[in-house]
Amino acid sequence: MTTQEPSVVAALQGAMADDERPENQPRPVRASEFIERLYRSSNSYADRLTTEELGWVDVDLGLNDHVINLAESGHQMIVTGNPGDGKTHLIERLRPALEKVGALVLTDANELTDDYILSEWQKCNSSGRAMVLAINEWPLFVLRRHPRATDFRPLKEALRQVQHAISYNFEPVQGPEGLVRVIDLSLRNVLARTIVFDVIERLTNDRFYVGLSPADPAVMNRNIMRHPQVRERIAMLLEEVARRGHHATMRQLVGFIAFLITGGVNNDTRLATQKSYTYHYAQLAFEGGSGPLFDAIRASFDPAAVTHPRRDIDLWRGTTVAEDWIDGRPPPSIQRLPFDDRIVEYKALKRRFFFEHHDGQSLVTLMPGDERSFDKLVHDGGAGSATVVRDLLLAINRFYQPDCPDTDRERLVLWQSHRFDVKAPSTFLALHEVRHGRFDIRPPKLASWVDEWLPQEQRIIRAFALTAMDEHGDAIAHLLVDRALYLTLVEARWGLGRTSWSRSATRRVTRFVDKVHNSMSLGKTDVVDVRIRNVEKEIEDRFEIQRHPAARYRL
């Protein structure tokens, strides 16, 4: 314990047994309770934390120096993103340094009126004073409705920087105008390995565990989570979640790690169940936690649901090798347990195997083939691979016609439909097709103002664009290919019912094809081949329309 932690020392020295405390004296708060409450986010809102508490959970994500440098040069910084991304936390930690260089600091736009925000912003713009504003993305866009926003160029520039932070064009996006700089924290991947390691390091600090019983599961969880292999496996688990497209906030990550340690309950509750797996970190990672990140983890990867061709039987029989486990002690046989306990105990053991056995990471490689195929598609698409174009054209064609031949990878059939309501149409009509040479793959590009602050390790490629071009090579339509769209195309290829498809992905495919059809100069001929298809009844027919000299139809 160091002398720089007076509030922790006071809390620990003031702790006393219930039978020794006067009736009117409240129980002092233990330092460990800070971790327990982080799971519920009651302590994760930066405006509710003291300066000391902010330091306990602060992780430098490489932004501090950048923000200070911009303030020193008189920039107007708009720190935006989703709730929980860490906007207020970042600015409150830097407030003393920002105010020292004369910057106006506005940390909670929700507590300020639009009129006040715009008025202060305009004053800073006129006087050349630096400004830092923390505001969620939607309220930032709402500001443009205010009368003060009329012809206020800094606001328009801020909105442009939000909308064009990522592009899929070969030409670079126009650089920032004036002194406005947007820092959109939703662009960073806080589930990156280095950040996960830092959060674990912060929350397993000695200050939170002084005075706790060695038998407390929180102490045991904390100790094992400091082991390099366990930290690596936790990072691997969260990388799998990020790879599947989940955007986690800093608040969610801190809450997740805190829950792995304490289970979100006090030490008395944990001690009452110390002989079971209930509050073991490997169990808590997949059961008991609530929130978007916990849901994403369960949907992404649970070791208990992955079958291993060799290790499962060893775990069941208790024949694993002692040296393969972190603690050097192989777990006992599951098959020797009472019948009713076997399934529950096996699930808990399989989860522990992932974190604590040297071969545990092999479970990730046994994920379904579609997931691995998507990884390869994103890699090849990010590299601009030409073969990806043909593969996607075939997949889109099979979206409309699951039984189309492999030769249909050389073209995109432009199926059209007439919609009477919001329901997916059942009948499609095709008059034209486009050769593969009019399409290319474009990986995402970050704008220059994002490149300035977003570290390489916090970037993650979750998608790329299939781009259609006109006869001059100019882009006319983009189809964003992410995991949801890929899985929808896979389900369509295998003939699964349309009710199982992602609605947003389905709309993206049909709108892309519609835009290509409406934008391209497809030429005119005297005879047009028409295909008509009912996707519900799998009925298709073809006929010709002779335009000249007179309209004639021939089946």
Image (cartoon, rainbow, N blue to C red):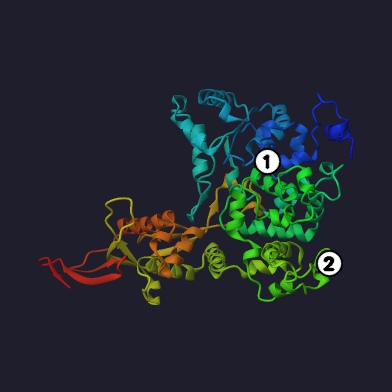
The residue furthest left is: 550
Can you say whether 381 is above or below 555 in the image? above
Q: Is residue 146 visible?
A: yes
Image spot of residue 253 (x, y percent): 67, 47
Badge 2 crowding class, 10 Å Cα cut-off, few under 14, some 14 to 19, many 20 or more, is few
Quadrant of the frame with the C terminus: bottom left
Looking at marks 2 and 1 on the same chain, the residue that comes earlier in the sequence is marked by: 1
Q: Quadrant of residue 103?
A: top right
Image spot of residue 312 (x, y percent): 69, 72
Tell me the residue at 54%/53% (across/down).
445
Which residue lies under the disc numbered 1? 66
In the image shown, does 366 or 312 lie closer to the viewer?
312
Quadrant of the frame with the N terminus: top right
Image spot of residue 282 (x, y percent): 72, 57
Which disc number belongs to residue 1? none
Tell me the residue at 53%/55% (across/down).
444
In the image shown, does 115 or 153 lie closer to the viewer?
115
Which disc number belongs to residue 329? 2
Q: Nearer the viewer, mark 2 or mark 1?
A: 2
Q: Which amino acid, mark 1?
A: His
Image spot of residue 317 (x, y percent): 74, 74
Badge 1 crowding class, 10 Å Cα cut-off, few under 14, some 14 to 19, many 20 or more, is few
Task: Judge left or right: residue 455 versus residue 482.
Answer: right
